[in-house]
Image (cartoon, rainbow, N blue to C red):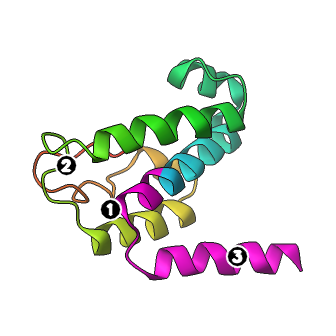
Amino acid sequence: MRTVLALLAVSSLVACNPSKEDFAAKMAELTCSKVSECYGTEALAAMGDYDSVDACITGMTADNTTYINDEANCPSYDGAKAAACLESFETATCDDLLEESACDDVCGDAGSDTGR
């Protein structure tokens, strides 16, 4: 039952256009979880000296929020593109993580790096 509720919560976040803060937090969660799953905790340490997925999520959420709220980095946040980014990233395989990203246009021209 918890799994179903968790999936519904994620689906509802992805189905609507997330706020900047929701996007930053969800992207951090997905990034840290996927990197750990695909490359192990050693990769988390290389990303930001994180010793666990939880530490990674906390650190990346703060970094992503700062980045996305800076007009120079993210001049034109697009919630619909953010939703597509999250959906794409959520379903990505380990091989997909290194490919082109549906996340590149979330912030407009200046914001091509959204945590991936």
Instruction: Judge from the rendering whether residue 101 lies leftward or rightward of residue 91; answer left or right.
Output: left
* Residue 113 x, y percent position in the rendering: 28, 42
Label ID, residue 102: 1
- Quarter occupied by the N terminus: bottom right
Count up the numbered dots. Answer: 3
Q: Which residues are magenta?
A: 1-24
User: Which is more N-terminal, label 2 or label 1?
Assistant: 2
User: Which is more N-terminal, label 3 or label 1?
Assistant: 3
Name the residue nearer the viewer: 19 or 15: 19
Front: mark 3 or 2: 2
Are dots 3 and 2 in contact, CB under 8 Å? no
Using the rendered view, name the quadrant where residue 77 is placed: bottom left
Residue type indicated by callout 1 = Ala
Examine the structure image and report whether residue 78 is included in the region drawn in magenta: no
Secondary element type, mark 2: loop
Cα–Cα gap, marks 1 and 2:
16 Å
Cα–Cα gap, marks 1 and 3:
21 Å
Using the rendered view, name the quadrant where residue 83 is placed: bottom left
* Residue 32 x, y percent position in the rendering: 60, 41
Crowd tier of the residue under label 3, counting other residues whose Cα lies within 10 Å: few below 14, some 14–19, many 20 or above: few
Residue type indicated by callout 2 = Cys
Instruction: Judge from the rendering whether residue 41 lies leftward or rightward of residue 61; answer left or right.
Output: right
Secondary element type, mark 3: helix
* Residue 27 x, y percent position in the rendering: 48, 52
Q: Which residue is mark 3?
A: 7
- Quarter occupied by the C terminus: top left
